[in-house]
Amino acid sequence: MKVLFAARAALWDSWAPALRRACPEMDLHREGDPASFDALIYAPGFPENGEVLDFTPFSRARIVQSLWAGVEQIVTNPTLTQPLCRMVDPGLARGMAEYCAGWAMRAHLRMDSFAQDGQWRHEIVPPLAEQRPVTILGMGELGRACAGALTALGFRVTGWSQSGRPVPGVEVLPGAALNQALGRAEILICLLPDTPQTRNLLDAERLALLPKGATLINAGRGSLIDDDALLAALERDRPGHAVLDVFRHEPLPAEHPFWAHPRVTVTPHIAAATRPETAAAIAAENLRRAMRDEPLLYLVDRERGY
């Protein structure tokens, strides 16, 4: 099969060897006649001249396999008529689980309360994890991975998704119960995709539902939270602290108030990365399925946007 690597040139050296190992029968190229390709492996930023890729000439392509989990920058392209599959990388899921579990433990244990100033704060004793309610917004692959890590540590985890689809070992609330999910969240983890339905989901009204002093961890998409509403909510201690890894504009501008806010921790979109060594196998399996006319993995629903 002939495949176009439709991603930035800087990604080639790390991805091409992994893809070729995972799929030796693949004839991988960086350029060529669009009508000659059986498939595309795609990431936003291609082409690098800033133009939006026109998928129309790729008349033979049976699949567009995204390198990233998020597809919001692709799914709205009106020229994309080929099947689009998002990347569900087991390495990415593990990385996300580690990030969220790490910050949840830091918040739970109040690690930042122990200033190294000579004061003996012996009265700061955290409860056990089973007494600390955690809510995860978004129960897809990443949400389930995080829930598994946190329940293994003893936390009481509530999940929330529009469908409310059951997850073993976790109470999952459906779309209509969002307020209930927020109201019990001493630690709130946001892992939702960017869709018209999720943008500004956490506005002033919903942030006010959080328990006093709650910790908000957003590793989903920056568009989930109304930035101005969050800054105002932090002054009311609902939440008491926000750990933010994703933003509406990245890199986050140096003058943005999040950087200097004493109740905000900024991390530079590092919660989870797609790792070629684990993701290549997923891409390879989907390419083979496309060539055999078999059901594709992680096919994007264009109506839902993910």
Image (tube, rainbow, N blue to C red):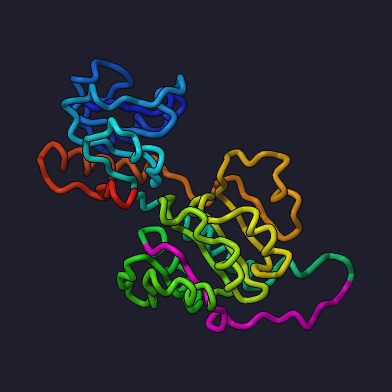
What residue is shown at x 65% (from left), y 54% (from top)?
228
Question: In which quadrant of the rendered view does residue 117 lie?
Answer: bottom right
- 195 is within the stretch colored magenta: no
Question: In which quadrant of the rendered view does residue 192 lie?
Answer: bottom left
What residue is shown at x 62% (from left), y 58% (from top)?
243
Q: Please provide the residue range marked out in magenta.
A: 119-139
Query: Can residue 64 be seen by looking at this rendering?
Result: yes
What residue is shown at x 34% (from left), y 34% (from top)?
77
Q: Position of residue 304 (x, y in %)?
A: 32, 52
Q: Position of residue 11 (x, y in %)?
A: 43, 30
Question: In which quadrant of the rendered view does residue 58 lie?
Answer: top left
Q: Position of residue 37 (x, y in %)?
A: 21, 24
What residue is shown at x 28% (from left), y 30% (from top)?
79
Q: Quadrant of the N terminus?
A: top left
In the displayed orientation, state which residue is furthest to the right: 118
Image position of 258 (left or right of 5): right
Query: Can residue 95 be seen by looking at this rendering?
Result: no
Assign the magenta stretch its main secondary structure: loop
Image position of 285 (left or right of 172): left
How many numbered marks appear? 0
In the image, residue 28 above or below residue 75: above
Q: Position of residue 171 (x, y in %)?
A: 39, 77
In the displayed orientation, state which residue is furthest to the top: 33
In the image, residue 299 above or below residue 61: below
In the image, residue 70 above or below residue 203: above
